[in-house]
Amino acid sequence: MTNRLDVVHRHGDHLSVTVGATGVELLRYVYRAEDAWEAPKPYIHPLRTLSGRIVTGYRPNDHRWHKGLQMTASHLSGANLWGGNSYVHGQGYLALPERVGSMAHVAFDEVSVEAGGLRIAERLSWHPRSGELWAEEIRRIEVHDIDEPGGSWALTWSSEITNRRVEPLRFGSPTTHGRPAAGYTGLFWRGPRAFRDGSIIAPHAEGPELMGQQAPWLAYSGEHDESDGHATLVFVHAPENDHSGARGEHPAHWFVRNSSFAAVAPSFAFHDELVLAPGATLARRYRVVVADGAWERGRIAAMVDGLVW
C-alpha cells in the first residue's frame, strides 16, 4: 500500500514525519543541541507505531541521556559521547564532565519524500569536550514499507563515520573497560518505561541471556501503558555489516536488557575495542521494523527473510 508522508522541518530544531492519511507522526528527528552533560547529539523521539503508540523513552530519571533512538559512543579514545557518568575500571561510574563530548549536526544534504517513503541525508561532526574534530559522519535515515494491513513500517539507519584524527579512534564500551555485560555503544534504542519485562526474541533463542550474543536480528515486544495492546520492534543487521566477523571484520554483539529498563543496541564494540585508523571509515546499516502487536518468532523470521536491502 502506498501512503503519503508529510514532513515538517522546524529549522534548527527537528524534522517531523507524519502519515498524511491518518495524521500519525511516525517519528520526530531532533537535531538541536541539548544539555552538555548529556552528550548532545541528534536522536529520534517520539518513535511511533502506525496506530500512534509511542515506542521510545526520553530522558528517563535513571539515565537522562537516554533519548529514543540515537547513535552513541560510550568510550571513544578516552571520551564519552554517550552522556552522563563515565565508567572507570576499579572505580565504577564517575562524574567526569571533561570527558563528555558531542555529535553535532552540520547540514542536511537531502530531505526528500517519494511514493510512500522518505529519505534524510545528514552530515555530522564528532567532538570531545575540548572541541577538536575527531570524526565526520554521513548519516542516512529512510522511512519505507508502510504496511497498514500488517500494522508495520520500516526505518533504515546508516552511518559512515570517518576518523579525522592523526591517530586511531578506539571505540569501546564499559565491558571493554572491565564491567561485565555492559557492552553498549553504537545505535541505541531506549524503550518506554512500560516496556520493562518485555519479550526478547532472536532466531534461535529468547530472553535476557541474549546479552552479549550474536544474531542477524533481535526483536523486543512490550505492552503499552494507557492504551491496550503491545508493540514489537525488530532490529536487523544489513547483509554488509558482517555481524559475526566471518569475513574478518570486527564482529557485533547485542546489548539487550528488559529488567530495570528496556534497551537494545547492536554494539560494535561489546567484548573488544574496534580500532579505526586515521582516514578510515566505519560503515554500518540497520533496519528497525516498528509493528503493532506482539509478534512471534515465526512471523518475525518470515518478515526478515522477505526484506529487500
Image (tube, rainbow, N blue to C red):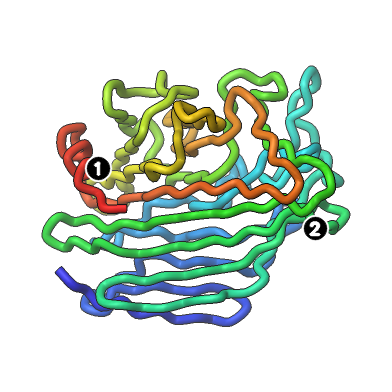
Name the residue rendered at 73%, 36% in the picture.
170
Q: Is residue 194 visible?
A: no
Residue 109 sits in quarter: bottom right
Height in image: 32 above or below 274?
Answer: below
Mark closest to the chain's N terminus, 2 or 1:
2
Residue 266: where, in percent of width, then height?
A: 48, 37
Q: Amino acid at mark 1?
A: Val
Describe the element under mark 1 as helix, strand or loop: helix
Name the residue rendered at 49%, 74% in the picture.
15
Residue at numbered disc 2: 133
Is 64 on the left-hand or right-hand side of 147? right
Q: Is residue 261 visible?
A: yes
Residue 89: where, in percent of width, then height?
A: 77, 21
Per the rendering, the mark at residue 134 is none
Residue closest to the far left:
149
Height in image: 160 above or below 236?
Answer: below
Name the residue rendered at 34%, 37% in the picture.
220
Crowding at dot 1, Cα within 10 Å, few <14 / some 14-19 / many 20+, comes out as some
Residue 258: where, in percent of width, then height?
A: 42, 31
Describe the element under mark 2 as helix, strand or loop: loop
Height in image: 284 above or below 254?
Answer: below
Residue closest to the far front:
247
Is 130 on the left-hand or right-hand side of 230? right
Per the rendering, the mark at residue 304 is 1
Name the residue rendered at 80%, 37% in the picture.
78
